[in-house]
Image (cartoon, coloured by chain):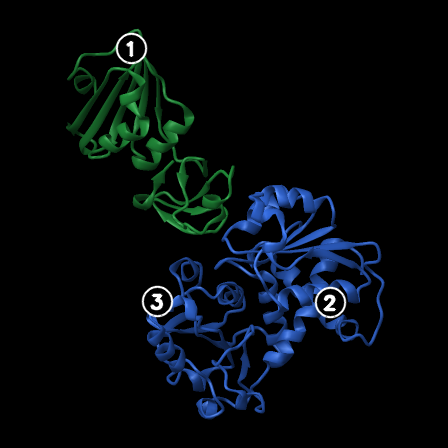
Chain colours: A green, B blue
Amino acid sequence: MADNLLKVQPIRNGTVIDHLRAGAGLKILDILDVASTGNTVSLLINVPSSKQGRKDIIKIEDRELTESETERIALLSPSAHVNIIRNYSVAEKTAVEIPEEVAGVARCPNTNCISNNERGATSRLLLRSREPLQLACAYCARLVAGEELQFL
Amino acid sequence: MDHVVTIQDLADDEIMSILDRARELLPVARGEERSDAFVGKILATCFFEPSTRTRLSFETAMHRLGGNVIGFADSRTTSHLKGETLADAVRMVAGYADAIVLRHPQEGSARLAAEISDVPVINGGDGAGQHPTQTLLDLFTIREELGKLEGLTVGLLGDLRYGRTVHSLAAALARYDATMHFIAPESLAMPRRVTAGLPDDWSAHTALDGVLPELDLLYVTRIQKERFPDPEDYVRVAGAYTISAETLRDAKPGLRVLHPLPRVGEIATDVDETDHAAYFRQAFNGVPVRMALLEMLLGGG
């Protein structure tokens, strides 16, 4: 892992998201809305990995992720690890985990669900299965496959 | 137990005690005996879309037990039109009544109401979702008509995709080891979210004749015109799923036919005269079953 982290310049403070499913990196950049926040970001795609074959890595300078952002990453790539970097060294390293319930993260795909129609309602999806990823709307019980997720 | 949003919210023994109590309440439901169990209690019936049987049988159930009813039968007469959220409407009504029956066109609305209300919420039908009190009265009717719930062979016919009554019923029958046959045009087949929750004892068909002789129970639902963009398709499909006395010639003599009503053309009136017809008794059963459920939620009785 040390080699991969050094492939682009090491960062002083910020976040390195490692062990992303190869191909998930671009989607995750989109969710993290990196273009508008002004932080320096690097994305490595298809990095050789002994565990995964290929993986993606994202480095974001001077930013630590919120819980909601970590949940989104987990939903897109359950294998990911989030490393918090402080003063060039890994201060915290956590494997992302899909929680039993994600609220306000992704919409229910049923357009006639109350959670998509009621002003002020928060979507709630309940975890049904991790592998393959499947959730169910807490309101209308509609099943949502991982690849169907539409993030809010 | 606080709210009844789906049939899964009721444990097996709760369902059984509702069905047992409903039988005891039959004389009160028929008006042969008087009850004042619910004097001073108020039920709110909030119907954001029209319904005749569900609303009237809840109101009758409440009145027969000496209680009162407030509510509306149509969202056009409410502040919903002014843009009020369901959450606000529920907060308000929860302050006026001891329990709420909600019928709403959007799926999940009863669950949302239950999260907000501090009085019991009963789902009276949420869009294409669930309709648990219909399921309770269906189970009651099946047990009264066939003498048992266990191990029946059941056919569900018609619009199985949008017909919410059949979704709840299939989930409930699975608890009683039913063998289920889902008979529907391909475009109206039972949705995966329902079949995913069932044990393996079910099969899908596009025609009734192959399975009819095995059935103890045939549950017929209405195929709605608005599901078909082309009216010609509707006429052709609806016609293929019509039941008449002639259609039922190969059925077991003890077969019972149920229908949540209203029927349009899917059961010919000549079936009414046969021993198979149980749908009018089924509609009446909504009263004692809803009485028993209200007793469970409101105390009393």
Residue B118 seen anywhere in this rendered image of the structure = no
Q: Residue tagged by mark 1?
A: A89
> Residue B70: x and y, percent?
73, 55
Eye-nearest disc, 1 or 3 = 3
Q: Residue tagged by mark 3?
A: B229
Front-most of residues B142 and A108: A108
Residue at x-position 59% and y-position 55%: B76
Q: Verify CB contact (< 8 Å) between mark 2 and mark 3.
A: no
Q: Give the distance between the C-alpha atoms of the residues marked 2 and 1, in whole angstroms.
A: 72 Å
Front-most of residues B234 and A19: B234
Q: Determine the secondary structure under disc 1.
A: strand
Amino acid type, residue under disc 1 in the picture: Ser
Q: Give the distance between the C-alpha atoms of the residues marked 2 and 3, in whole angstroms.
A: 38 Å
**Residue at mark 2 shares a chain with residue at mark 3:** yes
Q: Residue tagged by mark 2?
A: B60
What is the chain letter for disc 1?
Answer: A
Q: Determine the secondary structure under disc 3.
A: loop
- Relative to A80, does residue B187 appear above or below in the rendering? below
Q: Determine the secondary structure under disc 2.
A: helix
Amino acid type, residue under disc 3 in the picture: Pro
Residue B190 seen anywhere in this rendered image of the structure = yes
Eye-nearest disc, 2 or 3 = 3
> Residue B43: x and y, percent?
73, 55
Question: Which circle's residue, 2 or 3, is located before the other in the chain?
Answer: 2
